[in-house]
Amino acid sequence: MKSGWGAYAAFLAVLVALSFVMPSAQDNYFARIAMGAGVAVTLAVSLNIVNGFTGQFSIGHAGFMAIGAYLAAAWAAWCHAHNPLGLLDVPMGRHLLFAGALLMGGLIAAAAGFVVGLPSLRLRGDYLAIATLGFGEIIRVLLENADSLGGSRGFSMPPSAISADLLWIWGIAATTILVAARLKHSTEGRAMLAVREDEVAAEAMGVNTTKEKVRAFVMAAFFAGVAGALFAHLELYLNPKSFTFMRSIEVVAMVVLGGLGSITGAVLAAIVLSVLPEALRPVQNLTGYDLRLVIYGLLLIVVPMKRPAGLFGSGELRLFKKAVPS
Amino acid sequence: MTEAALELEGLTMRFGGLTACDNLCLTLPKGALMGLIGPNGAGKTTAFNLITGVYPPTSGHVKLFGQVLEGPKHRRAAQGVARTFQNIRLFKDLSVLDNVKIACHMRAQSGFWAALFATPGAKTEEARQEKRALELLSMLGLSAIADCAAASLPYGAQRRLEIARALATEPKVLLLDEPAAGMNSTETGDLMHVIRRIRDELGLSILLIEHDMKLVMENCEGLVVLDHGVTIARGLPQAIQRDPKVVEAYLGHAWAEKLAAEQARESHV
């Protein structure tokens, strides 16, 4: 049984090395795409804990992301105005404040996940989907009407807020993957899978299904909140329109395409679906039409037709399996 | 008299106008193997569902070693009642081994945070579950297929896996809902051998629902017969076989009369 620390540490070391070797990578076109993909990976891997592990169909992930994003924005604005402990004047201090934003964004989103999860997880299937959809929309509408956060005009991050870089974004993505993988291969994670497979049998075998569902919901919300905070520091401008129903659907598409329950699948599908619109730009230049979304849509039709269980079913790549406790 | 493992006291369940289980009383002594029989729709599975907390009973209660069993299903499992399902309910997409490991979960000695930080405690727990699960699989002859998906197993093996999974919860009382359904006579014979063995080795008390009368008559030490929710007979298998009420429930009034006439003739001779 391996803990996965090795692979995790190696990945982080590469990221750190990269940020020293290419400090200007931040402004690079490809780095921007990679960072967007990193946020998507965090979102997809976290949603997979709910939709893939416990089999509950949540389509309100953008709501939790929005909570994390706006909390990070409000925090950055507050820090800009008050400069707590003079931290804004030291480079490390800014990173510290950013780390605080990530943590708080995650925790508040997790708290929202708990509040939403406890009543709505009594619902099943389609009804749960509608309830989570409703939650996501409520958050968006609240934000559109919150003048102190810019309302529908949006909210610009203060100049003192740092830009999220590759190290931060992929470091968080790797952490999310590590946590999800350890969970999946632990007794706790198997209890979640049991909820997905057969709730009646799970209960009869002593699994507290309500607890497992709420726990999955809270964990997913936490990482969605963190991803939201990353997103805020990546874009440096927030608008409630970034957190519509479509954003939630995008994440659901990644999870389903990758294979419900498969972490490897969620990671790959998140990367492919967020890189694809950019990668297809040459096609647009060639044909003169913007066919990118057509191809994107076709992918969403063809993959489920050819592989109904998603790219990876609920399994993992060998490489991944070895890196985590099993 | 031996200690009672499971006591059902006046257990009644009404679904609207239908009384699925009417004032059911049953005492399962510690270490016993008893049968609950009756024609289809007699309320046998309803009784199991009442014991395991799937429905709250309209009235009456269940005691496990003198303690009233109540609360949600998972807590009853923790108190020591495990069951198998008539319509097999395995975790289909998971491996045979994982099916059994899941039932070890509630007795786990390390929790969520330990798993996330991959602590030594979490590793010990993982090893403990693996060892326990493999022991149970070998007991039920499933070791060779531990890594197969549960859904890919033949029917008989699925039924045995249900038993292995139930045993992994470390129960005191085991409820088997038609464990031999769909098995041929050789398989049934092997199964009963295993059931008696686990009863003796693990010190379990077993209540069994079964339609295979040969199995029931040869193995059960006591029987309770239900029909339309009502207890129509109880006692030793030999007596039950010749009970006119039981014969009537299974075979109809004509057969019951025939039997009664036969018995009258025999007593004349």
Image (cartoon, rainbow, N blue to C red):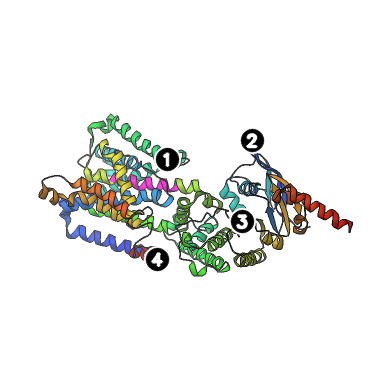
Give the labeled residue for mark 2.
B17
Give the labeled residue for mark 4.
A2
Instruction: Judge if badges 3 and 2 mark residues of a common chain.
Output: yes
Against B17, is B73 above or below? below
Q: Quadrant of residue A131?
A: top left
- Residue found at the very far right of the displayed protein: B268
Against A19, is A163 above or below? above
Give the labeled residue for mark 1.
A128
Q: Position of residue A185 (x, y in %)?
A: 42, 59
- Cα–Cα gap, marks 3 and 2: 27 Å
Whether residue B66 is visible to the viewer of this picture, yes or no, is no
Q: Chain of mark 2?
A: B
Residue drawn at the location 50% of the way across and 70% of the way down = B144
Q: Position of residue A94 (x, y in %)?
A: 25, 47
Q: Chain of mark 3?
A: B
Q: Which region of the structure is painted magenta? A: A214-229
Q: Position of residue B200 (x, y in %)?
A: 67, 65
- The amino acid type found where label 3 is placed reads Glu
SS for callout 2:
loop
In the image, which is nearer the foreground, mark 3 or mark 4? 3
- Cα–Cα gap, marks 4 and 1: 36 Å
Q: Quadrant of residue A130?
A: top left
Q: Nearer the viewer, residue A156 or A115?
A: A115
Residue drawn at the location 47% of the way across and 59% of the way down = B151
Circles 4 and 1, Cβ within 8 Å, touching? The answer is no
- The amino acid type found where label 2 is placed reads Gly
- Cα–Cα gap, marks 1 and 2: 32 Å
Give the labeled residue for mark 3.
B178
